[in-house]
């Protein structure tokens, strides 16, 4: 993802890349970040040291790297876009605390299409939550075989948003096995599929007696996530301190 952010930012005249940061053990340190990204050289070397002055930081790394990123941005009063998933509750609390000091955009998915689909899912749940016979919600997510967390942060966010529209007693059920008995009326089911190099696909099924609605959003490559992160970075400029999400970036009601 870092390579795609570098590649797309290099093509956007509104950006000037001043640093490309990775862990100290990366054997590619010292090489031109543009060349590492498969793009033309940009005159910025991949490094583990942070620059002194930047306008915004995009973190697309791993949970293990995020704490240092947050601390560095707070110390320098630098706006931050967090696109890293699989965060612990402690890290989420740390992000919320940091947002009282700097502006932060944090979302489980940077994809503009995913976030629009989340808004549609909210509307379906809000409209049909009390439909006669009940509404069954199942979320199926597909990702590449290398993904470390399951279900995806995006799938969990879909479930969170839908659950808020349904009931305070919504149950979140992960997979099914054995003689499970009849499906309860107040559950949201999650199913994680790991196949090949799938960059990300989510299907939300709203089942009723006699009909159903399926919302499907799928990425064909990772550029949609990089483009969304760059859009968030632009939007953050001049914003007051606070915790924002992609609904804010898109101008959608949260």
Image: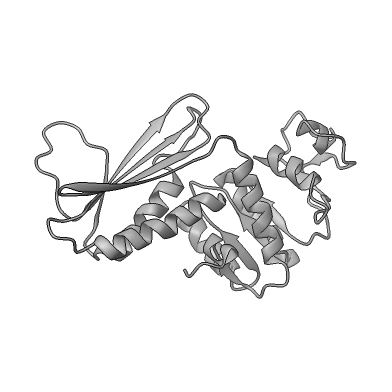
Q: Is residue 67 visible?
A: yes
Image coordinates of residue 120 in percent, x first then y, are: 40, 58
Question: Relative to 41, is 227 on the left or the right?
Answer: left
Q: Which residue is rendered at x = 49% and y = 59% of the image?
A: 92
Question: Relative to 150, is 91 on the left or the right?
Answer: right
Name the foreground residue: 129 vs 61: 129
Image coordinates of residue 202 in percent, x first then y, are: 42, 42
Q: Is residue 109 visible?
A: no
Indicate the quadrant where residue 25 lies: top right
Q: How many numbered circles are shown? A: 0
Image coordinates of residue 101 in percent, x first then y, are: 64, 72
Image coordinates of residue 194 in percent, x first then y, are: 42, 29
Indicate the quadrant where residue 142 lies: top left
Outermost bottom residue: 240
Q: How is the image coloured?
A: one colour
Against 168, residue 26 (above or below) is above
Outermost top residue: 196
Question: Relative to 83, is 186 on the left or the right?
Answer: left
Outermost front residue: 210
Q: Which residue is rendered at x = 22% and y = 36% of the image?
A: 176
Against 82, residue 140 (above or below) is above
In the rendered image, which quarter contains the N terminus? top right
């Amino acid at each position: 993802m870092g390579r795609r952010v570098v590649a797309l930012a290099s093509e956007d005249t509104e950006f000037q890349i001043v640093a490309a940061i990775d862990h100290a053990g990366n054997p590619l340190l010292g090489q031109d970040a543009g060349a590492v990204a498969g793009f033309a050289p940009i005159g910025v070397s991949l490094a583990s040291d942070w620059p002194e002055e930047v306008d915004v930081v995009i973190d697309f790394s791993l949970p293990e790297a995020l704490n240092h990123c947050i601390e560095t941005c707070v110390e320098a009063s630098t706006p931050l876009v967090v696109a890293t998933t699989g965060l612990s509750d402690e890290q989420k609390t740390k992000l919320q605390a940091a947002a009282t000091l700097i502006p932060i955009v944090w979302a489980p998915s940077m994809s503009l299409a995913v976030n629009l689909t989340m808004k549609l899912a909210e509307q379906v749940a809000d409209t049909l939550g009390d439909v006669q016979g009940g509404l069954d919600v199942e979320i199926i997510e597909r990702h590449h075989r290398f993904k470390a967390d399951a279900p995806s942060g995006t799938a969990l966010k879909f479930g969170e948003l839908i659950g808020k529209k349904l009931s305070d007693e919504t149950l979140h059920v992960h997979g099914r096995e054995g003689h499970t008995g009849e499906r309860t009326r107040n559950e949201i089911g999650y199913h994680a599929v790991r196949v090949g190099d799938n960059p990300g696909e989510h299907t939300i099924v709203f089942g009723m007696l006699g009909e159903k609605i399926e919302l499907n959003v799928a990425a064909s490559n990772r550029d949609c996530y990089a483009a969304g992160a760059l859009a968030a970075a632009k939007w953050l400029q001049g914003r007051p301190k606070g915790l924002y999400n992609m609904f804010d970036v898109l101008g959608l009601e949260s």
